[in-house]
Structure formats: C-alpha cells, structure tokens
Amino acid sequence: MRGALRPGARAGLVGGAVLVYLALVGMLVKFEELRLVGSQVTRGRLLLVLPPFAASFFAVRPRVIGGRVEQPGPGVALALGAVAGALVGAVGSVGLALVEAIGVERIRPVFVAVSPALVETLTFGRGAAAGAAILVVGGAALGAAGGIWRAIRHGLRRPVEVGLLTVVTLAMLQRIVPFMLDELRLERDWLYSRATRGLTWTGAVVVLVVATAAAAYVLDRRERRALAPAAEGRPEVRGWRRTALVTIAVVLAAALPQLAGSIVSEIMGTVGVFLLLALGLNIVTGYAGMLHLGFSAFFLIGAYAVALLTGANLVTAFGLVAPRFSADLNFYLALVLVVAIGAAVGALVAAPVLRLRGDYLAIVTLAFAQIAVILATSSWLQPITGGPQGLRDVTKAPLLGLEFRSAERFYYLVLAFCVLAVFVSWRLAWSRVGRAWNAMREDEQVADAMGVPTGRYKMLGFAIGGAIGALGGALFAVKVGTVQPGSFEIIQSITVLAVVILGGLGSVPGVVLGALVLLALPGLLSQLEEFRFLIYGAVLVAIMILRPQGLIPNVRRMRELREEERTQDAWQQIFAARQEREAAEEAAEAAP
Amino acid sequence: MSEEATTVRRLGRVERLPTRRIVLTALSLGVGAAVAYGSYRTLTLPAGARYSGSAWRDFLVLGIAQGAVYALIALGYTLVYGILRMINFAHGEVFMAGAFGSFFFADAWKESGFLDRRPLLAVLLLVLIAMAVSVTVAVLLERIAYRPLRGAPRLVPLITAIGASLFLQNTFRGLFGAQTRGYPKPRVLEGTWSILGIPVQRVQVIVLVVAGVALIALTLVVARTKTGKAMRAAAQDQEIASLMGIDVDRVIVTTFVVGGMLAGIAGVLFALTFGNISYFMGFAPGITAFTAAVLGGIGSIAGAAVGGLIIGVLQSVGPALLLTGIHVPSPFQLKDVVTFLILILVLLFRPGGILGTGEAEKV
C-alpha cells in the first residue's frame, strides 16, 4: 500500500514546491486582483487551485507496467489524488508557518514578494491556523477531484476541458470582448458583469455548456474520421474549407481595429512587427534548420537603416541634429533598400560561418547581434546612431497623403506586410528552394550527397530571413517613431525564438498562433507584463520537453510522422496475424 | 591509369576551390594589420596622452584577476560540453545564483560586523554558501530541463538551455527584486598589497589565490580520483563507459555539481571584484567564459584556464591598446566587442581552440 501511494507523494511534493515558487516569485498576489467569474473566482485563486489539481492529475496518470498500460481504477485514483493534493496543501502550510515564525518584515528584504497581502491570499484572510487547515483540506479535495478527473474516459473528459478553457479565456479577455460586443451592438450584460468586469455566473455556465457541446461534436467527428481506413484517401485539408478559413481570418483581421478599438490595434501592431521577425526566423531556423540566436540584429539594422535613410534626427545635448550620414528618401523607396541591406547583411554574416556545426553557428549569430547592439550604443558611433539616446523623428511612412502613425492605420500597414510575408513563406515552403532546405534540415550530409549545394542554400536562407527581419525592424521604427538601442537587446531574439518554437518550427500558421499567444496575450491580460519573460523561458523549456513539434506542427513533418505510424500499424497487423496463425496451428497440433 | 589519375586530380582541384581559404587569409591579414596599426598608434601617442607604464601594469593585473574568474566559469561549460556535447547556456545563471545567494549573508554579516572582524573566515563561508546555492541550481537544472532530453537532436537542449537561462534570470528577479545591489567587501580587502614590489589590489590577490586553489583541486580530482576517471571515461564515450559499469547519469550529475561549485566560487570572487550584483549579471560573464572555453579548446580543462586568462587580459588591455590610438572615444564600452570578435575569429580559424585537437568535429 505504501508503495502504491508513492507516486501521489512525489507529485504532491513537486506540486507543493510549485505552489511555494508561485507565491515567492510574486505571481499569486499580482494575479489576485483580476476577477474572472462572478466575484469569487479570481485569477490568483485559479492559480492557487492549479497545483493540487495538476499534481494529482499527474500522479494518477496511466503507467506502463510490465509492457502494459495501466490506468488506476477510480478508488485508487481518488486515494492517490487526495494524498497528492493534501501534500501540496501541507507544503504550502509549512511555508506559511515558517513565514509566521520568522515574521513578514524580516523575510521581505530577501524575498521581496512575501508581503501581508500574500499571507492574506494564502490564509483566505482567516488567520494562520485556519488558513493551513483550508490549504490541506482544500488541497485534498481538489486532489481527489483531479484524480477522478483523470480516471474519466478521455472522450468525455476532453470536451469539458475545452469548455473550461474557453470560459477562462473569455474571462481573461474581459478588456476586449465586451468592448467588441458593444461595438457590434449586441446585448452583453448577461455575459459580462459591469460591476466585476468579469463573466457573470450565468454567462460562464452558458459558455461552458455551449463550448463543451461544440467540442464534443468536433472531437467525435475527428476521431471517427481518423479511424476511417486510410485507403479511402482522406484529404489532409479540404480545399473549400481552407479557403473559407483563410477568408474568415482575413475578414476578422481587417475588421479588428473597427471592432476592438485603439488599445487592441496598438497591441496587434506590435504583434505584427514581431510576427514579421518570427516569419523571418522561421525561414532560417524552421525551414533551413539553422538556429539563429541573434535575430534582433536584423531588427536593429532594419530600424536604424530606415531611420537614417528617411532623415531622422539625433538627440544631443544641443538639441536635434542630423546624423553624420543620412538621406531623405521616400519611405517606400527606403524600404526596398532596407530589405536589400537586411538580405546582404544576413548573407555576409552567414558566409564565413556556414561550415560551423549547429550550436557553434547559433553562438556566433548571438555574438554578431551583441556586437551590433554594443556598437549602436557606443560613443564611437554616436554621431551616426545617436548612442544610447538613439534617433528621433522617424518618418510616418506617408503614402498618398496618408500617415501611418496612429495605431489603427499602422495596424493596416503592418498587416499588409505580414500577409505578404506569410504568402512568401508559404510559397517558399513548397518550392524547390523549400525542398532543398527541408532536405538540408533533415540531414545535411545526405542533402550534400544528393547534390544540394548546401552552402548556397544556407546563405539564401539567411538572406531571405534577414530581409524579412529587417522589414520588421523598419516597421517597428515607424510605429515607435524613435530608434533606441535598448529596444533591440538579445531578449528580443529570444522572444522571437520562443514564438517560433511555441508555434512549431517551420509551420506558418503555428508562427502566427505563437505570436498571438506570446505577444498579444501579455498585452491583453493586465499584470502579465512583469512575468512575460519568466513565462517565455518556461515555455521554451516546456515545449522542448513535452511537445518539440510545437502547437501547430509543420504539415510535412506531421505527414512523415503519420507515415511512420501507418507502417507501424501495418507491422503490428502482420505480427498479430502471424501470432494468431501460430496459435491456431499449436491448437491444431495439441488436439490429437 | 594515368588518364584516370589526371581526371581524379583535376576533379580534386575543382572541388577544392580555395575561395574560402583566400577569404580567410585576407581576413586574418586584415585583422592582424588593424591590431598592429592600432597598437602602434596607441604606443606612439604624444607623452601627455599616453598611458603610463603603471597603467598598463594595472590593466594587466586586473585582466589576470578577471581572467581567473572567467576560467572558473569556463570550466563549467567545458566539463558539461565534454560529456553531453551541449552548450549549457544557463551556466551564467548558475554563476549569478551563487553570487546572489551569498549576497544576503554578506550583507547581514557586514551589518553585524562579522565580515570585518573575521574577514578570512567570512569570505570562506561566503564561498561555501555560494557553492551550495549554485550546485543546487545546477543540479535542478540538469534534473528538470536537461535529463528528459538525453539523446535529442543537438539544437533541442540548446534551445532548452536558453529558455532555462531566461527562466532563472526572471525567477531571481521575481524572488529578490530587480535592482542592482552593492556587494559588501571586508574592510581589510580595500587598498593594495605590494607583491614583488608591485602594488596589487588586495581583492585581486584573494581572487587569484582562491581561483588558483580551485583550479589545482579540480585538476587533482579529475586526474587522480575514481570519480575523475569516470568523468573522463564518460566524456570519451558514454556508451562504452556505461558498459564498463560506470553510472553515466550519476557522472553527469557529478559534472553539474563540480561545474556549479566552480561557478559559485566565481560568483563570490566576481562580486568582490566588481562590487555589484543583479539578476542580469550572469549574461555577459557567461558568454565571455564560453568564449574562453572555446578559445582554449572546449572539453579541455587546461584549455579553459588558459582561455580564461587570455580573454581576461585581452578584455582589459585590448580596448585601450587597440582603440585609444585611433581616437575612438571611451574604448572600454567596446570590451565585449573584443570578446565576441575573438569568439568569431577562433571559430573561423581554429574551431578546436588553442589546446584542442585543431580540427573541430563536423556536423
């Protein structure tokens, strides 16, 4: 029996550690204020509920024992889950007791997040003893719920999970969705409360039911289609459906500023800029398979180039001064030059290091990007780049008398270029070049042996990626109106990398989704900004371990995986048939 | 036969077009000329604008001291790379963790006067605390982020390491706050000691002594103990090592422990030398130390030490020597450019490093 409970104990301790971490790093308190459903469910409480639930969910996971998958029965699941959840609460209580014993004021100089508000959150405002009891008992209850939840059949569980996720998402988007409903003149008071700003209980229940039903329908259909024999030739994506999806996406994207107002347009403008960068990186890293850690360099080059080519000014102690080298070109002419510069720099940087192995190549790109930032900041190049203060008065990209500085207009500008970049990426993927990259990514030596000039294609990848990245930089400069080296630190490279990795290397829809999740969400969800990079780091680690193919995997890779599965299935069928035959023969022999 | 041979020779000549070699030679000549010109101009500046001999000596000593710190960090990269063939990008954060962990004790002891009353004991304890913190972080890192990825394609652990680095930085930011903090120094260590008639900053003497002891201890452990033997075996061939009865997983953990210990020591020494710590302090020394490891020949312990010293000296002497003469304002802003250029040049010309095999393994 003790041995049987061990997974629960382990998961409970890990969950407890996670709970303590969330508390100490400051998330619990910071997230407390946002009300999601009614006035009872806040984001902080949701975060508090997650560790025991998740711990027991993991503790009760099916295990492979002796070559067979074993799912614990409901009773065991309940016990295991309760143990795990209670342990999470117990670890939390021990933490609370420590805080009480030492005193909040004495801990605070070291752990800055430990505050009376944190203690208040963890004890539910009822004092230490009662708080600890609530944590343990509540943890056990949540854990038991998590365990039972895991024991429920997958087909039943999944739709409800989708439903819950929809409710939470809608509740989190409380700054935008009600606004959109108002714009559309739809009644919204049944869904979003005006007092708490979050969902009302009625609204939440309706959304849950509708989303669950829809998910159940879709998942059921998908499963049935997946079970259909491959011989019937199920198409990957049907033509008309893809067209419809793309049309809907384009219409939505075009109507967004009208529907959602300028805050959302502003955020989506940033998303667009980073989407361009991510599409560029996707070509280098996703298509051609070369990890680029210094993509912010193209961002920087694009921004500075467009600023210098269109007559931006330096900020100095003596007021605004023209930089030592500058031109006063039309923005769109300059943009052509910027793209060319980006491509040239990409290829030139790549040329000498192409022979390096993947991880060394990555570090060299990082080194180049750091050099670019340091040079842009330095006093040496101050007469050109403006040093730390940078350049001001970047062009507003006038086109036929229209200026693109306001959030809504800039959104359309960046949307146009994003559509263009998506189109280019998509066409490239299935072109001869794309196939060459694909071959190179899968196995460079084999590609070489098959006659793919890998060096040339690598340089081409860097050049195209650099061009798109520089385009993103140029648009960023237009958006902000100033160019400062601080905007192009290495962290931007890692942000872009996280976008591409989360979405799925080499998958254009994945990259779009990744940009929306990683860049739009922190902007839309208040208070997430502070933990943005923490979450990016966690996302990079978690994705690489749990789902290296990303959220929306590259179609071609997916197909390869499926092929493998099918072959495996075929082998299994043959194997099973042979076993049956042998068993029959044995039986025949045994019978006299 | 002869006809065939000529064809083969011709084909060979066509394939080995020396463009790359020409470009590299031109590049190396250009770099050499720039270095020579810059140094010449700096050394022939008019007497008033020139650095004095003692200034150069101070640069050199500072360079050696910070080089020793880089060497300690570089060893962490080199050891892990030797066994796992991965760049542990988050090692800079392991170093930062040590400095941060010991800071709170140093601060409290400064307040209570312990740091000034028993400086030797206090610094020793700080080093031990920093080692403990760094080792904890390094082992957790290995267990949570890297172990699930054994045998994954090479770029996967690198991306994970980058994520872990970002995660650790922001964890420390969340836990302990974003501000830069002053790291207290025992009063005894202010000022200079005269060594062989040369005045040397006292902190730098301590740094050199501690780093030297750590390096010697590490060399002995790797060369003389059974654990060290197991580490060397695993570095050569994990599979064969495991067949010989070596628990490779344990050796890997040991490697992270050793790397973490050295990083912890480096953290305290760095904090004592520069007097400031922040959650972001691991990045630049981390990259610099990685450069040192590559320069010395990644995977080689002596290489990491040599590379660290060279990079340290080049960082402190290089900008002044090369850039003052050609009138670049504030040359020390560009010291990291020196590091990164060295990294790029080493990878171009001798990817195996100074003490490496000369030929980097390909693909």
Image: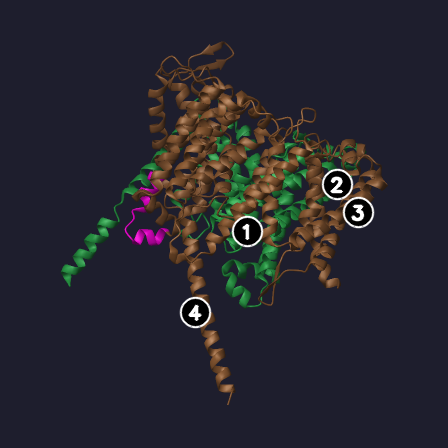
Q: Chain letter for green, please.
A: B
Is there a contact, CB below 8 Å, between mark 4 and mark 3?
Answer: no
Chain A takes which shade in the image? brown
Q: Nearer the viewer, residue B307 or A487?
A: A487
Label 4 lies in what chain? A
Q: Tell me, for residue B122, which label it has, or none.
A: 2
Q: Mark 3, chain letter?
A: A
Give residue A574's mark: 4
Q: N-terminal of the two: label 2 or label 1? A: 1
Question: Dots 2 and 4: beta carbons under 8 Å?
Answer: no
Which residue is identified by label 3? A137
> Which tag is nearer the camera, tag 4 or tag 3?
4
Q: Earlier in the sequence, mark 4 or mark 3?
A: 3
Residue situated in front as seen by the camera: B93 or A144: A144
> What kind of element bears circle 3?
helix
Q: Residues within 10 Å of mark 4 (few under 14, many from 20)?
A: few
Say if the magenta span includes residue A438.
no
Residue nearest the viewer, comparing A96 with A148: A148
Q: Main secondary structure of the magenta part?
A: helix
- Tell me whether marks 1 and 3 sit on the same chain: no
Q: Position of residue B342 (x, y in %)?
A: 45, 38
Picture quarter containing residue A534?
Answer: top right
In the picture, the disc for residue B80 is: 1
Q: Vertically, is B150 above or below A460?
A: below
- For the record, the magenta segment spans A444-461
Coloring scheme of the render?
by chain
Query: Is disc 4 on the same chain as disc 1?
Result: no
**Residue B179 at what x, y percent from top left?**
66, 29
User: Residue type at mark 1?
Assistant: Val
Q: Are marks 2 and 1 on the same chain?
A: yes
